[in-house]
Amino acid sequence: MVHRLSQRGATIAAVNERTPRIRRTPLSADVRIVVRGEDLGDDTAALQAERFRRRFPDWGRWGLSALYAETDAEVDDLGAGPLRRFPILGIYRVVDLEAADFDVVPTFRTPHVTIAFVGELADGIERLRTAVHEQRPNPYHGTGPDEEVNP
């Protein structure tokens, strides 16, 4: 069995414990990707990519976790939920990531995706840092789960 990884058509063989679980449903080109923007300026993204590659050595790619959203309301929900601990949200469109030579792969459980790349780790992190994107303050950062926020 072969899985389609991205709109650019990259493929891999069936998934096993040494490759990530890839969902069969493709992403729309208009999907917005939310990543931990503040982590792109330090070693956190590189450490995450190294951990990903060690965990899934047969895939032969670096990987960075992200979550997808199709609307600003969904971006807001992600900021209030799983991304609450991050003060800045980096928001990328799939087409812009692909233009910077990344694959956006629907992995694990929705809305998780992996921003995947090959080549030198430092080059990939720099490409992501300089790719077209928006950095948005997360108004939910530092608030408790029951606190109201006026974004």
Image: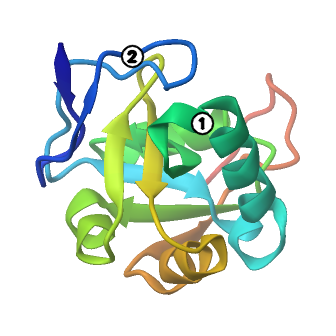
Q: Is residue 42 visible?
A: yes
Q: Amino acid at mark 1?
A: Pro
Q: Is residue 25 visible?
A: no
Say if 135 sits above or below 9 in the image.
Answer: below
Q: CA distance from mark 1 to mark 2?
A: 12 Å
- Give residue 132's position: percent from left, percent from top: 37, 81
The type of colouring in the image is rainbow
State which quarter of the image contains the N terminus: top left
| Tag 1–tag 2 contact (CB < 8 Å) | no
Give the quadrant of residue 11.
top left
Say if 129 sits above or below 8 in the image.
Answer: below
Q: Helix, strand or loop at disc 1?
A: helix
- First in sequence, mark 1 or 2: give its number: 2
Q: Neighbour class for label 2 at 10 Å: few (<14), some, many (≥20)?
A: some
Give the quadrant of residue 45.
bottom right
Q: Helix, strand or loop at disc 2?
A: loop
Q: Residue at x 14, y 42 (%)?
A: 28
* Residue bearing mark 2: 15
* Residue bearing mark 1: 57
- Give residue 120's position: percent from left, percent from top: 58, 74
